[in-house]
């Protein structure tokens, strides 16, 4: 499946207003029409997701809903990870990584 880049309508409208402040009268008129059209275009109902590979719950037996308790006679009870790297669920939370000299923990923006 091809990746589709989505933007927030409010971010695009804000960008048009900023550009409009530095434009000529004709450019502002065109930007105003674009602003109106963009405001009326139908939006995609989408939410940000956290993939299993980036989730802080992955690999924790007590928090990850896709890690199941299994029983085998040879091994007894053990947990089986049923996640996939590109999988996701509604419980996903991005794991924190340490950045910078201060060591402050922040969500990893690169993923």
Image (tube, rainbow, N blue to C red):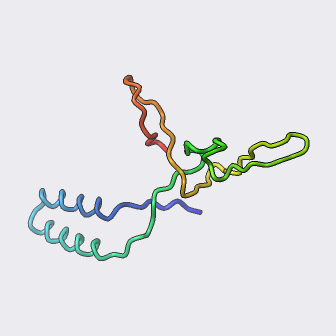
Q: Looking at the picture, does residue 5 appear above or below residue 31?
A: above
Please state the horizontal and vertical placement of residue 11, each as a whole percent of the image. Answer: 29, 59
| Depth order, front residue of 43/88 | 88
Which residue is at the far left?
25
Q: Please identify the quarter of the rendering in which residue 37 is found.
A: bottom left
Q: Please identify the quarter of the rendering in which residue 39 is found.
A: bottom left
Please state the horizontal and vertical placement of residue 101, each as a whole percent of the image. Answer: 38, 23
Q: Looking at the picture, does residue 102 appear above or below residue 44?
A: above
Residue at x 79%, y 49% (from the top left corner)? 70
Quadrant for the N terminus in the image: bottom right
Residue at x 86%, y 40% (from the top left corner)? 75
Which residue is at the far right?
74
Q: Looking at the picture, does residue 80 appear above or below residue 40?
A: above
Which residue is at the far top?
101
Left or right of 39: which side holds 20? left
Please state the horizontal and vertical placement of residue 2, each as a whole percent of the image. Answer: 56, 62
Q: Please identify the quarter of the rendering in which residue 55 is found.
A: top right
Left or right of 43: which side holds 71? right
Left or right of 68: which side holds 18? left
Residue at x 48%, y 37% (from the top left corner)? 96
Residue at x 25%, y 64% (from the top left corner)? 13
Count of residue discs: 0
| Depth order, front residue of 68/5 | 68
């Amino acid at each position: 499946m091809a990746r589709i880049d989505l933007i927030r309508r409010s971010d695009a409208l804000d960008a048009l207003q900023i550009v409009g402040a530095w434009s000529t009268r004709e450019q502002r008129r065109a930007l105003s029409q674009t602003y109106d059209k963009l405001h009326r275009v139908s939006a995609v109902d989408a939410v940000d997701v956290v993939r299993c590979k980036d989730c802080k719950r992955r690999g924790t037996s007590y928090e990850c809903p896709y890690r199941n308790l299994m029983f085998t006679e040879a091994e007894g009870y053990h947990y089986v990870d049923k996640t996939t790297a590109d999988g996701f669920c509604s419980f996903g939370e991005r794991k924190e990584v340490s950045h910078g000299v201060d060591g402050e923990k922040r969500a990893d923006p690169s993923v």
